[in-house]
Image (cartoon, rainbow, N blue to C red):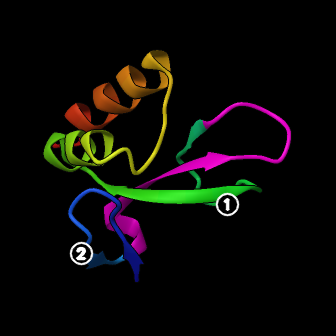
Amino acid sequence: MRMCIGCREMKPKKDLVRIVTPKEGETHVDLSGKANGRGAYVCKNEACLGAAAKMKAIRLSDEIFNTLREQIANTE
Protein backbone atom coordinates (compact mmCIF):
# COMPACT_ATOMS: atom_id res chain seq x y z
CA MET A 1 0.00 0.00 0.00
CA ARG A 2 1.15 3.50 -0.87
CA MET A 3 -0.25 6.95 -0.14
CA CYS A 4 -1.45 9.24 -2.92
CA ILE A 5 0.04 12.73 -2.52
CA GLY A 6 -3.18 14.26 -3.89
CA CYS A 7 -6.00 12.70 -1.89
CA ARG A 8 -3.78 11.28 0.90
CA GLU A 9 -5.52 7.89 0.73
CA MET A 10 -3.72 4.56 1.02
CA LYS A 11 -4.12 2.48 -2.14
CA PRO A 12 -2.44 -0.53 -3.73
CA LYS A 13 0.71 0.34 -5.64
CA LYS A 14 -0.79 -0.91 -8.92
CA ASP A 15 -3.56 1.72 -8.68
CA LEU A 16 -1.06 4.60 -8.50
CA VAL A 17 1.46 6.28 -10.81
CA ARG A 18 4.99 6.80 -9.48
CA ILE A 19 6.91 10.01 -10.02
CA VAL A 20 10.62 9.64 -9.30
CA THR A 21 13.54 12.01 -8.86
CA PRO A 22 16.93 10.30 -9.13
CA LYS A 23 19.98 11.65 -7.26
CA GLU A 24 21.30 13.04 -10.49
CA GLY A 25 18.80 13.76 -13.17
CA GLU A 26 15.39 15.09 -13.90
CA THR A 27 12.08 14.13 -12.35
CA HIS A 28 10.13 11.74 -14.55
CA VAL A 29 7.19 9.37 -14.57
CA ASP A 30 8.21 5.83 -13.61
CA LEU A 31 5.77 3.45 -15.25
CA SER A 32 7.74 0.38 -14.11
CA GLY A 33 7.67 1.50 -10.46
CA LYS A 34 11.24 0.28 -10.03
CA ALA A 35 13.49 3.23 -10.98
CA ASN A 36 16.10 4.35 -8.46
CA GLY A 37 15.47 7.59 -6.62
CA ARG A 38 12.95 9.29 -4.38
CA GLY A 39 9.42 8.49 -5.45
CA ALA A 40 5.96 9.86 -4.87
CA TYR A 41 2.67 8.31 -5.86
CA VAL A 42 -0.49 9.84 -7.27
CA CYS A 43 -3.83 8.25 -8.17
CA LYS A 44 -4.63 7.64 -11.79
CA ASN A 45 -7.07 10.55 -11.98
CA GLU A 46 -6.71 14.22 -12.81
CA ALA A 47 -8.37 15.38 -9.59
CA CYS A 48 -5.58 13.91 -7.44
CA LEU A 49 -2.89 15.24 -9.77
CA GLY A 50 -4.44 18.71 -9.58
CA ALA A 51 -4.73 18.51 -5.80
CA ALA A 52 -1.07 17.47 -5.47
CA ALA A 53 0.01 20.39 -7.64
CA LYS A 54 -2.23 22.84 -5.77
CA MET A 55 -0.87 21.72 -2.38
CA LYS A 56 2.65 21.89 -3.82
CA ALA A 57 3.15 18.31 -2.67
CA ILE A 58 5.42 17.83 -5.66
CA ARG A 59 7.14 20.20 -8.05
CA LEU A 60 6.98 19.20 -11.68
CA SER A 61 8.00 21.00 -14.82
CA ASP A 62 5.13 21.87 -17.15
CA GLU A 63 6.37 19.22 -19.58
CA ILE A 64 6.35 16.43 -16.97
CA PHE A 65 2.99 17.61 -15.57
CA ASN A 66 1.38 17.58 -19.02
CA THR A 67 2.88 14.16 -19.85
CA LEU A 68 1.56 12.74 -16.60
CA ARG A 69 -1.87 14.31 -17.16
CA GLU A 70 -2.04 12.75 -20.64
CA GLN A 71 -1.04 9.32 -19.31
CA ILE A 72 -3.67 9.54 -16.60
CA ALA A 73 -6.33 10.59 -19.10
CA ASN A 74 -5.48 7.50 -21.20
CA THR A 75 -5.92 5.16 -18.22
CA GLU A 76 -9.26 6.54 -16.97
- N-terminal of the pair, mark 2 or mark 1, is 2
Q: Which residues are magenta?
A: 13-27
Can you give x and y, in whole percent of width and height, for residue 70 in the image? 30, 25
Report the mark closest to the observer, 2 or 1: 2
Residue 74: quadrant of the picture: top left
| Dot 1 crowding, Cα within 10 Å, few <14, some 14–19, many 20+ | few
Helix, strand or loop status at disc 2: loop
The quarter in which the N terminus is drawn is bottom left
Q: Residue 34: which disc? A: 1
Can you give x and y, in whole percent of width and height, for residue 76 in the image? 15, 43
Image mark count? 2
Can you give x and y, in whole percent of width and height, for residue 63 in the image? 47, 16
Report if the CB atoms under discs 2 and 1 are less than 8 Å apart: no
Residue at 21%, 47% (x, y): give it.
Answer: 51
Residue 53: quadrant of the picture: top left
Give, as a three-letter code, the residue at label 2: Glu
Outermost residue on the top side: it is 63
Residue at 27%, 38% (x, y): give it.
Answer: 72
Q: Is residue 38 left or right of residue 43?
A: right
Q: Which residue is mark 2?
A: 9
Nearest to the observer: residue 31 or residue 42: 42
Give, as a three-letter code, the residue at label 1: Lys
| Dot 2 crowding, Cα within 10 Å, few <14, some 14–19, many 20+ | few
